[in-house]
Amino acid sequence: MRQPGGVLFFDGACGMCTRSRDLLLKLDRTGELQTAPLQQPGTAERLGFAPEHLMDSVRWLDSTGRVYSGAEAANAALSAALGTVLPLAVYRIPGVKAVQDAIYRWVADHRHRFPGTTPYCESHPVAC
């Protein structure tokens, strides 16, 4: 079974987030993975989040219109890229979700301390 394609919304001002996005695109076997910075105008409305909460975590909007956040979003995007629901299925195993959510939150809160690359919004300012 395949995870539907969609759009990964990431922090385009973050070098680590941009590097993670670039790696995910390299892993994309399906060609159904799209990405966009959370800073792109209209994103809060598109995803149904209040603007002040938009940057809380990475977001995944699948082709059915469902929105995922945080570790679940990362797993859904990886599942779509690999063409299998396996990463998302593992995430949903009791206990795994709590651990991944805690790790995701810690990494997200400290993302600017991790090595990265040129942030997407610096190299693509028109998109942000």
Image (cartoon, rainbow, N blue to C red):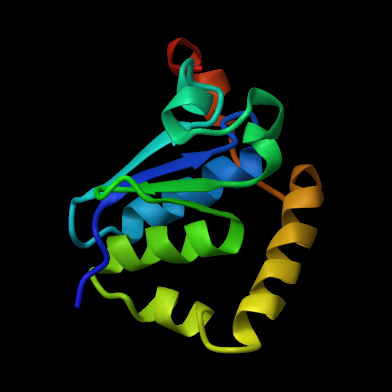
For residue 96, side relative to residue 75 (left or right): right
Count of number-bearing discs: 0
User: Which residue ends up furthest to the top in the rendered image?
Assistant: 126
In this rendering, position of residue 105 left or right of residue 100: right
Which residue is depicted at the point 69% across and 77% down?
Answer: 98
Q: Is residue 121 left or right of residue 33?
A: right
Residue 67 drawn at (x, y percent): 44, 48
The correct choice, above or below, for 28 with respect to 61 in the image is below
Snapshot quadrant of residue 80: bottom left
Looking at the rendered image, the quarter that the N terminus falls into is bottom left
Where is residue 96 shown, x and y percent of the image?
61, 84
Q: Nearer the viewer, residue 65 or 60?
A: 65
For image coordinates 18% across by 51% down, the residue present is: 31
Q: Based on the displayed image, in which of its 4 quarters is residue 18 positioned?
A: top right
- Relative to residue 42, is residue 69 depicted above or below? below
Residue 2 locus on image (x, y percent): 21, 71
Position in image of residue 47 (x %, y %): 46, 35
x 25%, y 53%: residue: 5
